[in-house]
Amino acid sequence: MGTIKTSGIIISESNLGDYDKMLTMLTPGLGKISCVAKGARRPRSALLAGTQLFCFGEYMMYKGTNTYNINSCDTIEVFYNLRTDLDKLNYAIEITKIVRDVTDENENCYKILQMLLNTLYTLSETDKNIDLVISTFKLKLLCFLGFTPRIMECVNCKEKNNLKYFSLKNDGFKCENCGRLDKGAISISESTVSAIRYIVMAPAKKLFSFSKFKILSFKSFWGMDFRSRSRTNRYIISQPDLPLENWRKCLMGTDSYHFTGFLLFKP
């Protein structure tokens, strides 16, 4: 196979041999791929900067038997500020691990890649609330994976007004009457309804435009803990500290993962 040119971001790195690196890269068209960067750990290597964690760039590579081999790279963004703030660094590592768990090779990952870049930029270059940024990322990622909550009406009676609860069992809002009958439903404010709707419906490039809707003042928002498990062709969403709710969905032509989801409330 000839040389391939692709943009991508490094979402994991490990040492290989004395001077090489084994990388996991997220690309828009090839999906998640494994790459070898030979000599990348040498002090004067041309691949040194472009093969670090979080680095986004243009890569020239060819496909070997099991991995891609990087020939050259042009660095576009390294998100340097993430490396100078321990909290931001830990959260950035968390979201790249999530992305690594829920993506696969030969998938169209353009939307996920775009959102990941926007999230890392927001963490690196702004002072927005970190917990809120991460929770927003996780909810939007769920939407990209096919888990969009039903947000325009009550999932039971179709009532469009007076939405006072979120039901993890039924994956969406419930009106006051229906929500009271659901022991696992969580009471939410009107501002939380607006926040969830905004996150679900906003394009990736405007996902973190919080000031317009004053999302930072919202008392609750969505958080997710993603855990990759064995491939079982099903999804399970459970709720810590509340009765376990199972939610199965299959995606055509893809393997599946287990997820643990919960609503994260701020005091």
Image (cartoon, helix red, strand yellow):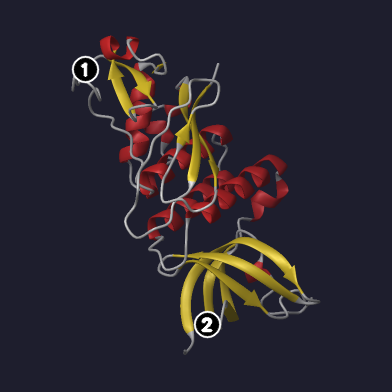
What label sits on residue 161 in the rendered view? 1
The reply to whether the C-beta atoms of the residues labelled 2 and 1 are less than 8 Å apart is no
Q: Position of residue 197 (x, y in %)?
A: 32, 32
Q: Amino acid at mark 1?
A: Asn
Question: Viewed as shown, does residue 18 lie left or right of 219?
Answer: right
Q: Position of residue 26 (x, y in %)?
A: 51, 63
Q: Which residue is painted at 70% across and 72% down in the image?
A: 21
Among all residues in the image, which is located at the extreme bottom?
2
Q: Amino acid at mark 2?
A: Lys
Among all residues in the image, which is located at the extreme front?
232
Say few, some or many: other residues with alpha carbon within 10 Å of mark 2 (under 14 / 14 to 19 / 20 or more).
some
Q: Earlier in the sequence, mark 2 or mark 1?
A: 2
Q: Position of residue 187 (x, y in %)?
A: 40, 14
Q: As rendered, which of 76 and 184 lies closer to the eye?
A: 184
Callout 2: helix, strand or loop?
strand
**Of the residues tagged 2 and 1, which is closer to the observer?**
2
Q: Which residue is painted at 47% across and 79% down in the image?
A: 5
What label sits on residue 98 in the rendered view? none
Q: Which residue is painted at 67% across and 70% down in the image?
A: 22
Residue ID for mark 2: 63
Q: Label 2, label 1: how many angstroms apart (C-alpha)?
A: 54 Å
Q: As rendered, which of 225 and 86 lies closer to the eye?
A: 225
Q: As rendered, which of 19 and 251 lies closer to the eye?
A: 251
